[in-house]
Image (tube, rainbow, N blue to C red):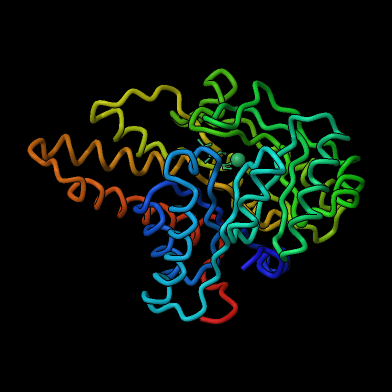
Amino acid sequence: MNTREMFKRAVAGGYAIPAFNFNTMEQMQAIVQAAVETKSPVIMQVSKGARNYANAQILRYMAEGAVAYAKELGCEHPEIVLHLDHGDSFELCKDCIDMGFSSVMIDGSHLPYEENIALAKKVVDYAHQFDVTVEAELGVLAGVEDEVSAAESHYTKPEEVIDFSTRTGCDSLAISIGTSHGAHKFTPAQCTLVNGVLVPPPLAFDILHEIEKKLPGFPIVLHGSSSVPMEEVETINKFGGHLEAAIGIPEEQLREASKSAVCKINIDSDSRLAMTAAVRKHLAEHPGDFDPRQYLKPARENMKKMYIHKIVNVLGSDGKLAQC
Ligand code: G3H
Ligand code: 13P
Ligand code: ZN
């Protein structure tokens, strides 16, 4: 399904839909298991990097498999969106639409304003012919990912959002209010030490509220929303890893954002951390194991636990399927 009805209900209901990235079968299985057990709608998203890693056809059929798997797990009416994350060209978006994706993001946020509008509109005009919904982005997030990089952030300007959403016709808008991609969202120098914990500066809720006032009820998306759980970082470091100063977005802030017009929250790094922590721990404790199933099983379980926690305790999308 596309995101239209899903977002309408999420905005009205004061919760957010989880958008989890997947590159591997274990991530896909964990996402589906978590969504079914919590009766949550879910967006499974695929980046350009994921397509390069796993192959576009394989990911597309894995998403079809995800729907069948959810039904097999007992969910008669699963709500699963297959979404392109950070599409960087019309051609990539078109390829995904032609392949059966139900939603795409065109990320022209790094382009000059008028070029961002022109590119997003071109994707919207094509996508809407097939009832595929489109997410566009205004404002630039800081952070570095394989295929997504921006050295510094530029918050979304509320005075531009009406013009941008009207002229592009986009179905949802990703905004920049202080989140960023990856596991190193803030430097320790940017944080305050509270009871031994580094607390980052708060998100720009004033900008979010201004945007909400300009676009009442319009679906807003937050990228870069991993919280980088300290216990996963500690497990990784305890068992041979070396992650320094990994700091994410505090979950209370995401909980607060979920109650607003923010109706899609993107989480990828937390899944990477959960997987890596479990694999490192297992291999360190079982040095003789070499069957990937032995260490990928606890990795899958750890990711599932994390996805359930996000759904139930942070985004509030549990029990929100239209029909069970
Ligand atoms: O926002 C980007 C996502 O975390 C995807 O990252 O491009 O490394 O697959 P990726
Ligand atoms: P994180 O790196 O914070 O998980 O953000 C993921 C994301 O925004 C995917 O588009
Ligand atoms: Zn993103």
Residue at 56 percent of width and 62 percent of height: 316
- Ligand 2, image quadrant it occupies: top right
Residue 272's spot in the image, x, y percent? 40, 40
**x 52%, y 78%: residue:** 77
Could you say where residue 186 lies in the image, as x and y percent from the top left? 56, 26
Q: Quadrant of residue 264?
A: bottom right
**In front: 84, or 188?**
84
Q: Residue furthest left?
A: 288
- Please identify the quarter of the rendering in which residue 322 is found: bottom right
Q: Residue at x 56, y 74 (%)?
A: 321
Left or right? Give the position of 127 relative to 268. Answer: right
**Along the horizontal axis of the image, is 95 left or right of 121?**
left
Q: Is residue 2 above or below residue 314?
A: below
Residue 307, image x, y percentages? 44, 55
Give the residue displayed 45% in from the left and 23% down from the top.
245
Front one among 182 and 94? 94
Q: Position of residue 161 (x, y in %)?
A: 86, 45
Please state, as top left, top right, bottom left or bottom right, where the N terminus lies in the image.
bottom right
Would you place residue 102 above or below residue 276 in this image? Answer: below
In this orientation, which residue lies closer to the viewer: 60 or 223?
Answer: 60
- Against 308, is 37 above or below? below
